[in-house]
Image (spheres, helix red, strand yellow):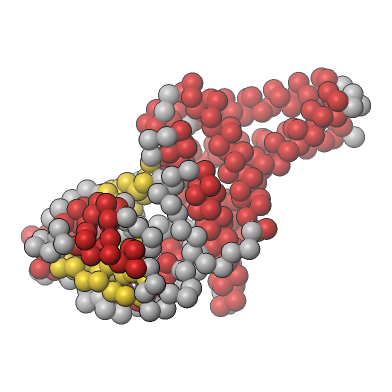
């Protein structure tokens, strides 16, 4: 019986390692992110762009940081407007936003929008409120604390024009000067440079992020309401046959301030993805698309779930070998060897990504702990009852 248990755990470890290796190797062979070949001088007339900035329990400095990136854009200022949307009862953020806006009145067309429907703490509700007042043909979305290159808006618009994309997203790197912040930065590098290219090339679905996101107003007149509204938007655009692009650019976003905020963020994402799955199938979709969505979810959820199951299994095997002495010590050695080999393979494939965020010595120690944390949160998220926008404290 013990041998069977160890063999099952080894198979799970092999599956998880193989899946990551396949994702990595496929992503290295394709070019997912694009830059436009068009220039603004080749376009007869650029469209007006409305940038929506939903804020909730934010500091003035965080809002200023994003406004500073927007004001530095090389997009024509007469074709650019910014809408900051604040919940009616969030008076602190409203006051902070007004202070922040004062610094940019001479360089930006900024409007304050009050969200009267503040009963539901969903980001999509705030985003849709702002869209009612937006005058742009293309709507862009950012969050407070976002920093991005000064050519991002122009290149996103040119790419949409050139490729007739309904929406364009970009990489969103989350970083903070802390151990957790460094691990999140590495994870975001892996997500955007390995996992998303793999998903885009296999299941033909591109998960978009809500920051650095641009959509055509004539195609998307509202953001679907979900705790993961950006993911649901991606699914709906794909189901309707629209093309989605990825701009070769980035947004730097401040990572959660501590592990509690990090866990809350991940629970919201996981619950949002589950909610999206229900909403998509309630609408009724073709069998082919339904299978693609299911495969997408499996590919995203399987690695952390397998890691969690393997870790729990390892603890159980260790207990039965060391404490109860029911099974042979060789079985534990066999399992440990499989786990070590798996980690070596993954760390070797990730070496380029790791070198961008931390040294290899630190990664060897910290990454298994971080992976276990992610697996635990993934497995336990369905048990957490939330219906509202869990604010990520930065």
| Closer to the camera in the image, 98 or 303 | 98
In the shown orientation, is residue 253 left or right of residue 133? right
Q: Residue placed at 19% from the left, 53% from the top? A: 68
Residue 392 percent across, percent down from the top left: 45, 54
Q: Does residue 184 appear in this view?
A: yes
* Along the line of sight, the residue nearer the viewer: 269 or 340: 269
Residue 235 visible here: no
Image point (23%, 54%), residue name: 64
| Whole-percent x, y for residue 371 in the image | 58, 38
* 89 is higher (above) or lower (below) than 63: below
Q: Position of residue 186 (x, y in %)?
A: 44, 37
- Residue 266 drawn above or below residue 229: above
On screen, residue 77 versus residue 282, left or right, reads left
Q: In this view, does 156 lie to the left or right of 116?
A: left
Q: Quadrant of residue 234?
A: bottom left
Residue at (54% x, 62% y) in the render = 272
Q: Image height check: is 184 above or below 332?
A: below
**Image check: 106 left or right of 177?**
left
**Residue drawn at the location 49% of the way across and 30% of the way down:** 349
For the image, the number of numbered tags is 0
Quarter where residue 384 is shown:
bottom right
Q: Quadrant of the N terminus?
A: top right
């Amino acid at each position: 019986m013990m041998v069977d248990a160890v063999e099952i755990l080894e198979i799970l470890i092999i599956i998880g390692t193989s899946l990551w290796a396949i994702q990595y190797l496929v992503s290295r062979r394709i070019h997912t992110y694009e830059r436009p070949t068009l220039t603004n001088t080749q376009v007869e007339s650029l469209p007006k762009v409305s940038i929506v900035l939903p804020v909730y329990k934010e500091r003035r400095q965080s809002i200023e940081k994003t406004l500073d990136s927007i004001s530095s854009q090389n997009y024509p200022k007469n074709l650019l407007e910014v809408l900051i949307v604040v919940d009616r009862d969030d008076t602190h953020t409203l006051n902070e936003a007004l202070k922040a806006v004062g610094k940019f009145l001479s360089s930006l067309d900024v409007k304050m929008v009050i969200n009267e429907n503040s009963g539901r703490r969903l980001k999509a509700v705030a985003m849709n409120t702002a869209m009612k007042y937006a005058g742009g043909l293309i709507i862009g979305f950012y969050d407070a604390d976002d920093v991005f290159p000064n050519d991002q808006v122009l290149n996103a618009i040119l790419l949409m024009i050139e490729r007739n994309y309904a929406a364009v997203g970009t990489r969103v790197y989350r970083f903070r000067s802390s151990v957790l912040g460094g691990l999140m930065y590495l994870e975001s590098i892996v997500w955007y440079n390995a996992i998303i290219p793999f998903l885009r090339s296999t299941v033909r679905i591109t998960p978009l992020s809500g920051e650095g996101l641009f959509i055509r107003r004539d195609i998307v007149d509202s953001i679907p309401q979900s705790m993961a509204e950006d993911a649901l938007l991606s699914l709906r655009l794909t189901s309707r046959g629209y093309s989605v692009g990825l701009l070769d650019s980035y947004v730097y976003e401040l990572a959660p301030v501590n592990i509690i905020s990090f866990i809350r963020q991940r629970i919201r994402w996981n619950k949002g993805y589950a909610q999206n799955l229900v909403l998509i199938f309630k609408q009724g979709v073709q069998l082919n698309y339904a299978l693609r969505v299911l495969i997408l979810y499996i590919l995203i959820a399987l690695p952390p779930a397998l890691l969690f199951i393997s870790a729990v299994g390892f603890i159980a095997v260790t207990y039965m070998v060391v404490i109860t002495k029911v099974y042979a010590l060789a079985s534990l050695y066999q399992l440990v060897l499989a786990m070590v080999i798996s980690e070596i393979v993954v760390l070797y494939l990730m070496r380029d990504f790791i070198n961008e965020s931390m040294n290899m010595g630190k990664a060897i120690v910290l990454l298994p702990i971080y992976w276990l944390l992610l697996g635990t949160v993934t497995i336990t998220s369905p048990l957490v009852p939330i219906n509202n926008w869990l604010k990520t404290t930065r």
